[in-house]
Amino acid sequence: MTSIPLNLRGLKCPLPALRVRKALKGAEPGALFLVECTDPMAAIDIPNLMRETGDTIEQSSAEEGLLVFHIRKAAA
């Protein structure tokens, strides 16, 4: 399965988390999202969202102002 890109660069809090929530809501179980953000608050907001929704951050990285999350939609 290929990853679904979500380019959220330039969006400010709370928009990155809201866009991720919307994308996950419409996704099939097991879908993998590649989320790119530049808002430093996303480092807090997106993990908190995952705790809320039960979805999983499989990998995350941060370098030069870019936050990247690999998010897997939970099984139904």
Image: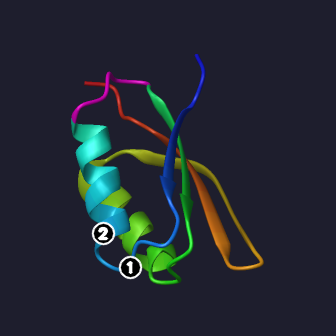
| Placement of 3 over or under 2, stated as above or below | below
**Mark 1 and mark 2: span between their CA atoms?**
6 Å
Few, some or many C-alpha atoms within 10 Å of disc 2 (few <14, some 14-19, many ≥20)? some
Q: Residue furthest bottom?
A: 40
Horizontal arrangement in the rendering, residue 32 relative to residue 74 (left or right): right
Residue tagged 2:
15
Task: Name the residue that disc number 1 marks.
Answer: 12
Classify mark 2: helix, strand or loop: helix
Q: Quadrant of residue 18?
A: bottom left
| Residue type, mark 2 in image | Leu
29 in magenta? yes
Q: What number is the disc on residue 22?
A: none
Residue beneath the point at 41% across and 72% down: 11
Where in the figure is residue 48, as x and y percent of width and height? Answer: 35, 69
Magenta span? 26-30
Question: Where is residue 35 drawn, in percent x and y?
Answer: 53, 52
Q: Label 1 crowding class (10 Å Cα cut-off): few <14, some 14-19, many 20+?
A: some
Magenta-highlighted stretch: main secondary structure?
Answer: loop
- Please state which amino acid type lies under the numbered disc 1: Lys
